Image (spheres, rainbow, N blue to C red):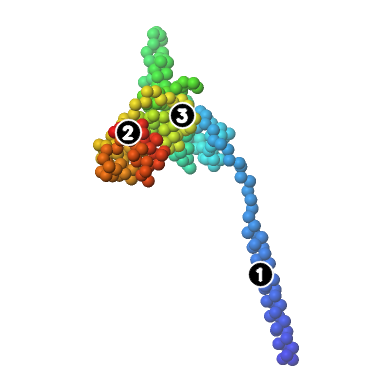
Amino acid sequence: MLIGTLVLIGIFLLGGETSSTSGSGSTRKTSSTRKIGITYAVPPSQQPECFYFDPNTADSTELLRLGLQPWQVRNIYRYRAKGGVYRKKEDFARLYGLTVKDYRRLEPYIRISEDYLPASTLVGNARRTSFSSGTSFPSSTSNYKKDSLRYPVKIRKGEHVVLNIADTAMLRQVPGIGAYYAKEIVRYGKWLGGYVSVDQLDEIDNFPEEAKKYFVIEKSDPQKLNVNKLTLQQLRRHPYINFYQAKAITDYRRLHGNIKSLQDLRFSSDFTDEDIRRLEPYIAY
């Protein structure tokens, strides 16, 4: 009797373990089945386009063509549905997830319709006329000037701007150039001492390639750096001379005397042939 009871207990334990193992195996199988990744369709990447648009009226197709993400387009729609209005270009920069790079790319193409400006802007715009009824009408000439300042008239294909003499107002007439890049062109030109090639615009971060065809260089006469007189700190202020190159110049003067040509520095490990080539127009001896 005792032996039979023990046999039954052994069978029960073995069966429970087998069942547990089977159950856990099934669990693991189910778990592993759940871990199989579910793939989602990802739309192919599309090259962003650039064209004039009003963020108050642009539809989803236009916004997507500009390179905005679908969730950003939904945010714009929600903002407009709640009564939100983009009254100036800078308002669009507040779009959640919009990077500085994307805003700089889109900023020259943003056009805010006058219909979305505050009604208070109408105050003071009226001009006296010769009508006896006393009705006032805005001056079309005045409005044209104001619109030209706010939205500069862009030059046409085949027209050019002389790079070294253009101010920010003239630079903003170039397609693809807004207030930011106009200031950057002037700032970098002063830092260089003048442009000697249109390709130097590529040295400005994220400069729009398509805008370069509207620039020309005429009678380039950049400011010169006298490499035999300037100190290390003065030399390194130029964007084409880093600390180690400035030190190599001053060390050469100390050891060998005045520099007669930049080729004297070609054996220095701090100067490559490309460094010497682009620095040559800015050097005096």
Inter-mark Cα distance, 1 to 3 = 68 Å
Task: Please tell me whether residue 39 is drawn above or below residue 166 in the rendered image.
Answer: below
Residue depicted at x 41% and y 13%: 135
Residue topped by disc 3: 212
Query: Which residue has dot 2 on it?
Result: 283
Q: Amino acid at mark 1?
A: Ser
Residue 6 coordinates in the image, percent (x, y): 71, 87
Residue shown at the point (68%, 67%) measured from the top left? 26
- Amino acid of disc 2: Ile
- Image quadrant occupied by the N terminus: bottom right
Residue 77 lies left or right of residue 269; in this view the side is right
Position of 260 with respect to 199 (left or right) is left
Q: Are marks 2 and 3 in contact (CB under 8 Å)?
A: no
Q: In the rendered structure, which amino acid carries the disc numbered 3?
A: Lys
The label number, if any, that marks residue 113 in the structure image: none
Tell me which residue sits at (40%, 41%) in the image: 272
Residue bearing mark 1: 24
